[in-house]
Image (cartoon, grey):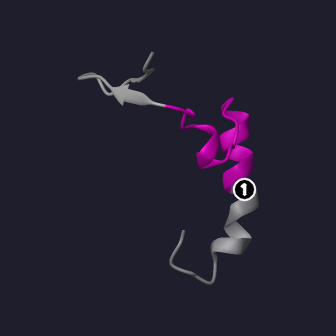
Amino acid sequence: MHNGAKNTPAALPGIIEGIKDKGYEIVLIKDLIPEGEYYTDVQGELHLSN
């Protein structure tokens, strides 16, 4: 959707509604990344460093 396709703006309301209907919440990427020092384990999970 980042390629500037002409139909993207018209499609977004339906896409957003479908996402929310499935119980998901739309958030900013910065809200998904923890502040401070952290590491990723072998399973791909983030852990805050002490």
Q: Badge 1 local density, few (<14 within 10 Å), some, or many (20+)? A: few
Q: In this view, does 14 lie to the left or right of 42?
A: right
The segment highlighted magenta reads 15-36
Q: Quadrant of the C terminus?
A: top left
Q: Which amino acid does label 1 sit on?
A: Gly
For the residue pair 30 and 25, the one nearer the viewer reads as 30
Q: Which x, y percent locates residue 44? A: 32, 28
Q: According to the image, label 1 marks what residue?
A: 14
How many marks do you count on the picture?
1
Q: Which x, y percent locates residue 16? A: 71, 51
Q: What residue appears at the point 54 percent right and 38 percent down from the top-left corner? A: 33
Furthest residue in direction left, as rendered: 42
Furthest residue in direction front, as rendered: 50
Any magenta on residue 18?
yes
Q: What residue appears at the point 66 percent right and 33 percent down from the top-left corner? A: 24
Q: What residue appears at the point 69 percent right and 29 percent down from the top-left corner? A: 23
6, above or below 23, in the image: below
Secondary structure of residue under mark 1: helix
Any magenta on residue 25?
yes
For the residue pair 50 and 24, the one nearer the viewer reads as 50
15, above or below 47, in the image: below
Q: Which x, y percent locates residue 17? A: 75, 47
Quarter holding residue 8: bottom right
Quarter holding residue 32: top right
